[in-house]
């Protein structure tokens, strides 16, 4: 008997690419709970970033585990059909930490929505926003750390977010829905 998958949609990319905006849009349109990854950073991570100090791998491991566990809890304890989570997941090994959520599960399926934008665009967006601890001076470090998803990462959907906010939102939604339709069709062939 085929079980209906419960998707963890990880909206990923560097600071300022539109993760929160697109994730909230997907959450509303797909009627799925939303988890803002920044809300789960420990205080020492926030202080470092607010002071212009890039996070190290060691700073991120516990945060990534927490996000993964929170997402799985939404699906299992909360019994949701899926959830939308924001997380930079700049490196492949970070994405691999999140992928563990679906390992060995017939129900939990992890998929990434990578928001692709160039550094100049992201710098402009971060410079224009107010009240966020991630400042423009940190953008370059995000791109230095970025390992764009490779072709063998078949669980990643890439969305170009160089256009308007609305274009990015609708493009992400269309690609997610296409992905689900294709994947669901393949499960029943």
Image (cartoon, grey):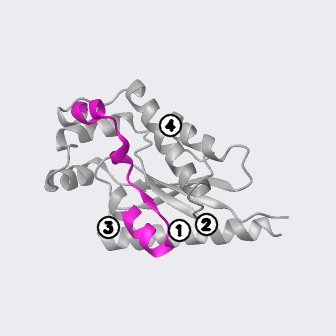
- Residue tagged 4: 65
Say if mark 2 contacts mark 4, CB within 8 Å. Answer: no
Spatial distance from mark 3 to mark 4, Cα to Cα? Answer: 33 Å
Q: Position of residue 99 (x, y in %)?
A: 60, 43
Q: Earlier in the sequence, mark 3 or mark 2?
A: 3
Where disc 3 sits, the SS reads loop
Confirm whether the magenta stretch covers residue 27: yes
Segment colored magenta: 22-48
Assess disc 1: are there few (<14), some (14-19) or many (≥20) residues with their C-alpha within 10 Å of its C-alpha: some
Q: Earlier in the sequence, mark 4 or mark 1?
A: 4
Spatial distance from mark 2 to mark 4, Cα to Cα? Answer: 26 Å
Assess disc 2: are there few (<14), some (14-19) or many (≥20) residues with their C-alpha within 10 Å of its C-alpha: some
Assess disc 3: are there few (<14), some (14-19) or many (≥20) residues with their C-alpha within 10 Å of its C-alpha: few
In-front residue for pair 116/27: 27
Mark 4 or mark 1, whichever is nearer to me: 4
Where disc 4 sits, the SS reads helix
- Residue tagged 1: 175
Mark 1 or mark 3, whichever is nearer to me: 1
- Residue tagged 2: 179
Say if mark 2 contacts mark 1, CB within 8 Å. Answer: yes
Which residue is painted at 68% across and 69% down in the image? 182
Spatial distance from mark 3 to mark 2, Cα to Cα? Answer: 22 Å
What secondary structure prevails in the magenta region?
helix
- The image quadrant of residue 115 is bottom left
Q: Position of residue 56 (x, y in %)?
A: 36, 26
- Residue tagged 3: 163
Spatial distance from mark 1 to mark 3, Cα to Cα? Answer: 16 Å
């Amino acid at each position: 008997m085929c079980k209906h998958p419960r998707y963890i949609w990880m909206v990923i990319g560097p600071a300022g690419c539109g993760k929160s905006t697109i994730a909230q849009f997907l959450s509303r349109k797909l009627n799925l709970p939303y988890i803002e990854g920044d809300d789960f950073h420990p205080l020492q991570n926030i202080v470092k970033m607010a002071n212009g100090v890039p996070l190290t791998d060691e700073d991120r491991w516990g945060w990534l585990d927490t996000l993964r566990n929170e997402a799985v809890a939404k699906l299992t304890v909360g019994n949701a059909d899926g959830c939308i989570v924001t997380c930079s997941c700049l490196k492949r090994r970070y994405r691999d930490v999140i992928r563990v959520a679906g390992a060995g599960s017939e129900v939990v399926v992890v998929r990434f929505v990578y928001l692709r934008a160039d550094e100049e665009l992201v710098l402009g967006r971060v410079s224009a926003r107010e009240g966020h601890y991630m400042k423009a001076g940190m953008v370059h470090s995000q791109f230095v750390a970025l390992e764009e998803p490779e072709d063998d990462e078949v669980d990643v959907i890439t969305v170009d977010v160089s256009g308007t906010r609305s274009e990015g939102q609708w493009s992400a939604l269309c690609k997610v829905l296409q992905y689900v339709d294709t994947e669901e069709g393949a499960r029943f062939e």
